[in-house]
Amino acid sequence: MRRVHLDEWSALAGDTLHRLRLNSPADGWFPALQDLSWCIAKSDPFHIDIFFSPHLKKVSVYLSWSWRDSEVPHDSDILPAVASIISLLPTSTLQSLLVGGGQRKMPWGYLKDSLSSIVLRCGPSLIEFSSTIQLSDAAANYLIHLPHLRIWRVEGPPPTYSASPLPSVFPPLTELTL
């Protein structure tokens, strides 16, 4: 299997992902997975890493529609779980990383450190980056220096990055959205 799309309407019983984890083969359920789309839902964000593959090329993380009109509780165990799971994403072959969405009530900033650490682990294969989460200065500077970055979207407040010396040749961006 090359693509998995988990949205809030996926017909999985509450403990299905937990059962998959308990019975997971040594090399994982989807060892050749390249495209993972993950909707953070209220139900169970704690087992999404069973879909991680060293061959991931595109990862999209977005918020469930069920939270569009309500605020995600800051004291819930969902945000720490999402942050730790995001930190585990394999990045060696990642070409596209899309995180966030138009949900203003989601405290995306809680995930800043996790996302920044992922960006810092990405290799030169990263071509597209889009996020509602502001990155650390180090991660933003790292993105600026990636040789193949073509698309960079910052959805949210303008970044306050203090750029280190810019590369002698700026990445050949084809799209920059602020």
Image (spheres, helix red, strand yellow):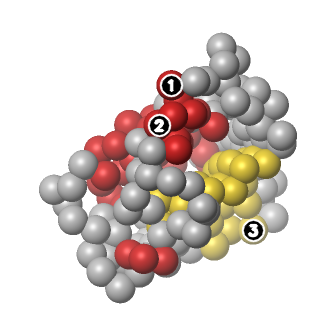
The picture places residue 160, in percent across and down from the top left corner, at: 38, 61
The kind of residue on which mark 1 rests is: Leu
10 Å neighbourhood of mark 3: few (<14), some, or many (≥20)? few
Q: What SS does tag 3 mark? A: strand
Q: Mark 1 points at which residue?
A: 22
Crowd class of label 2 (few under 14; some 14 to 19; many from 20; radius 10 Å): some
**Residue carrying label 2:** 18
Kindly check if marks 3 and 2 are in contact, taking CB atoms under 8 A apart as contact: no
Q: In which quarter of the image is the C terminus?
A: bottom right
Helix, strand or loop for disc 2: helix
Q: How crowded is mark 1: few (under 14 residues within 10 Å), some or many (20 or more)?
A: few
Instruction: Find the distance from the CA under tag 3 to the CA under tag 2.
Output: 40 Å
Instruction: Compare residues 155 and 55 and report the one nearer the observer.
Output: 55
Name the element at disc 1.
helix
Question: How many angstroms separate mark 3 from mark 1 (CA)?
Answer: 43 Å
Mark 3 and mark 2 lie on one chain; the one further toward the N terminus is 2
Q: In which quarter of the image is residue 46?
A: top left
